[in-house]
């Protein structure tokens, strides 16, 4: 696969850069062209072959649960203030909700969770039966997934950490590329180029043929 080969080359070049004192994130950037952000907006959840990190998850549940950070209905009123809502949205990467609470969640938190792309969704985030196995399953899926949303004509997502193996980073990047390609209206014609970078490096550019 040509793209996978190019991604490997890009990682090899990035690893030649100056060493940093922290485990840099590997960013995968897809630059789009001839793409209408309003008409063709992308909103996907992509399962990744290799976990990058554990995500911070919060659950809206009827009763408190020791297996996950929980917000119960009686605590909803403490989030009536704009600042409290902003802090909550910033604190967590992902939100899930018990199905029975979704109308209340939408009313109380929707105006902040929606624009941030963190609203619990049927794709991944609605819990029908609250027990340990269901919560564990949802958490595993969340930790091995990434959200793809188009806000501009450039999609930038973390696909790994510098400490991960080259092939793991490549497989994660390719999974995202493949998922996005399937929903682009004009396939590869909508992709200007691809870039791969570490947190502190300049990007390595890959032209899609």
Image (cartoon, grey):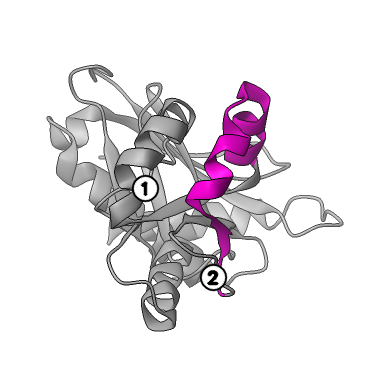
Q: Which mark is residue 71?
A: none
In the image, residue 79 lies at what x, y percent? 59, 34
* Residue 14 location (% of width, % of height): 64, 52
Q: Can residue 3 be seen in this view?
A: no
What's the magenta region? 67-90
- Residue 36's place in the image compared with 183, above or below, is above
Residue that appears at 67% across and 35% down: 87
Q: Name the residue under label 2.
A: 65
> Which residue is under mark 1?
120
Q: Which residue lies furthest to the left in this view?
A: 185
Residue 156 position in % (x across, y down): 48, 37
Counting every numbered tag in the picture gives 2
Q: Is the residue marked by circle 1 packed among few (<14), some (14-19), or many (20+) residues within 10 Å?
A: many
Rendered-image quadrant of the C terminus:
top left
Q: Residue at x 41, y 36 (%)?
A: 117
Dividing the picture into quadrants, the one containing residue 37 is top left
In the image: residue 113, left or right of residue 125: right
Please tell me whether mark 1 sits on a helix, a strand or a loop: loop
Foreground pick, 164 / 43: 43
Frontmost of labels 1 and 2 is: 2
For this rendering, which residue is in front, 13 or 33?
Answer: 33
Report, in whole angstroms, how far the alpha carbon at label 1 lies from the one at label 2: 17 Å
Is label 1 in contact with label 2 (beta carbons under 8 Å)?
Answer: no
**Which tag, 1 or 2, sits closer to the chain's start?**
2
In the image, taking residue 63 as reference, residue 86 lies left or right, namely right
């Amino acid at each position: 696969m040509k793209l996978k080969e190019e991604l490997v080359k890009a990682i090899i070049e990035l690893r030649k850069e100056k060493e940093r004192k922290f485990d840099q994130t590997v960013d995968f950037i897809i630059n789009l062209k001839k793409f209408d952000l309003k008409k063709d907006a992308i909103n996907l959840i992509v399962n990744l072959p290799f976990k990058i990190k554990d995500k911070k998850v919060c659950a809206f549940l009827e009763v408190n649960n020791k297996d996950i950070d929980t917000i119960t209905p009686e605590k909803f009123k403490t989030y009536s203030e704009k600042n409290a809502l902003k802090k909550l949205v910033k604190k967590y990467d992902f939100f899930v909700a018990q199905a029975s609470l979704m109308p209340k969640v939408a009313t109380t938190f929707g105006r902040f969770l929606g624009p941030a792309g963190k609203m619990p969704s049927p794709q991944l985030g609605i819990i029908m039966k609250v027990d340990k196995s269901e919560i564990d399953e949802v958490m595993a899926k969340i930790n091995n997934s990434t959200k793809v949303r188009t806000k501009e004509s450039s999609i930038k997502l973390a696909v790994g950490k510098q400490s991960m193996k080259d092939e793991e980073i490549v497989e994660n990047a390719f999974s995202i590329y493949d998922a996005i390609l399937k929903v682009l209206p004009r396939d590869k014609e909508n992709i200007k180029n691809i870039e791969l970078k570490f947190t502190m490096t300049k990007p390595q550019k890959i032209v899609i043929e």
